Image: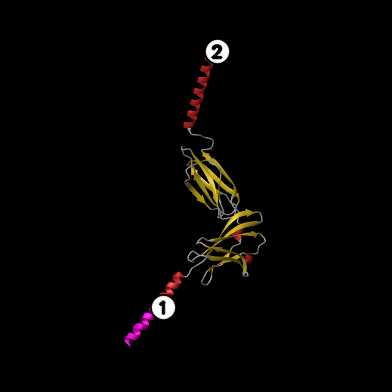
Amino acid sequence: MRLLLLFCLAILATSSFSMEQETELTPKIFITYKVQDFFPRGRRVLITCHSPQMPPPITYSFWRSRDVEVAKKVVKTRDPASFNINVTLKSRPDLLTYTCQASPTWGKHMTSTKLQMYWELWAKPVSQIQADFTMLERGSGPRVEVSCLASLGSPPITYSLIGKNGHIHMQQRPQHRQPAGFSFPLTTTIDWFQCQAENDINVQSSPFTLVPPGQLPKGPIFMLAASITSIAAITSGMLGRNRL
């Protein structure tokens, strides 16, 4: 009786191990996308299907909603398969649902989770950034007030005040169509600053602005003045020799 019990336990353990191993070895397929080009009323989108655990060759098929096969590719390596689609502004949300299927030479095919996209396709990149630097006298001393606003761009937009060395001094995420406001005390140190606007699509920056406005470091000015003086002296000497 004891031997029979041990034999049953051994079979159950082996079966459990086989199921766990099968679960771990079950390949998965992933579907991702990237917006490549922006047009006034459309987008060109790159769809990527990939099953890294499935042995090649793999037949990838790309499906849209209502079980409509859009395209099919055979990949003989472990690289992903890519599909390009054009989406117009008139496309209904229910038609922008996609899946990928991966089929090996032997075995059953695998289907990815559904990829649904709509609003993010029509998100607009940030552009037309305006940055205003103003010096104000406060009770605690002079300060620099900075206003940053991107005229175009889908929210949320994050604004950053960045120095010439790439250091981010301040960040804000104001309400849509509202400017970001930065303020810092004016010191004797002269530096360059720019405003950067970023959303989920792209990053744009304003030109660098010298702070305090309208001032340049004394070193370069002194060197420039000295150079001009030297040039004037040399020119005067040459003119004097020509007269002789």
Quadrant in the picture for residue 20: bottom left
Q: Which mark is residue 15?
A: 1
Residue drawn at (35%, 86%) of the image: 4
Residue reaching furthest bottom? 1
- For the record, the magenta segment spans 1-16
Residue drawn at (37%, 83%) of the image: 8
Q: How many marks on residues?
A: 2
Q: Is residue 127 above or below residue 221?
A: below
Identify the residue position indicated by label 2 in the image: 243
* Between 184 and 238, the one nearer to me in the picture: 238
**Residue 87 image point, x, y percent:** 64, 60
Label 2 neighbourhood size at 10 Å, few (<14), some (14-19), many (20+)? Answer: few
Comparing labels 2 and 1, the label whose residue is closer to the camera? 1
Residue 9 part of the magenta segment:
yes
Alpha carbons under labels 2 and 1: distance apart: 110 Å
**Residue 3 image point, x, y percent:** 32, 85
In terms of secondary structure, where does tag 1 sit? Answer: helix
Residue 80 part of the magenta segment:
no
